[in-house]
Image (cartoon, rainbow, N blue to C red):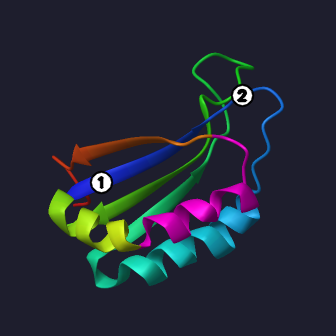
Amino acid sequence: MIKVSVMYPNKAGAKFNHEYYRDSHMPLVKSKMGSALLYYTVDKGLAGGAPGEGPTYLAMCHLFCDSVESFQSAFGPHASTIMADIPNYTDLQPVLQISDVVVGKP
């Protein structure tokens, strides 16, 4: 299983509509990717490592798929539609990482 992490860095003055992201954008991603997207999680940044420090990322989502190939074949045809929705919830550029899930839920 792989995890695609989409992370939105915390920058001064950035806008991020968490409700839109949770209630509209991520359901859009799921509807476009279909069964290739096994499940997803959404994180809202709370704090950094030091007391009083802001979060490194304002928000993140993690998309879980069977393989890089299944992710690419499901996301690719809809990438322009999904990416076009980004300005509806943020002015940030997301950072993407694809990881192999070595340890998952028990």
Secondary structure mostly seen in magenta is helix
x then y, percent, for residue 103 = 19, 49
Q: Which mark is residue 11?
A: 2
x then y, percent, for residue 73 = 24, 70
Q: Closer to the camera: disc 1 or disc 2?
A: 2
Asked whether 99 or 28 is in front, the reply is: 28
Q: Which mark is residue 3?
A: 1
Seen at 41% across and 42% down, the residue is 96
Q: Is residue 53 above or below residue 95?
A: above
x then y, percent, for residue 94 = 54, 43
Res 93 quadrant in image = top right
In the image, residue 45 lies in the stretch drawn in magenta: no
Res 65 quadrant in image = bottom left
Magenta residues, start to end? 78-92
Left or right of 67 in this view: 24: right
- Amino acid identity at mark 1: Lys
Asked whether 3 or 72 is in front, the reply is: 72
Seen at 47% across and 83% down, the residue is 31
From the image, which quarter does the C terminus lie in? Answer: bottom left
Seen at 38% across and 61% down, the residue is 63
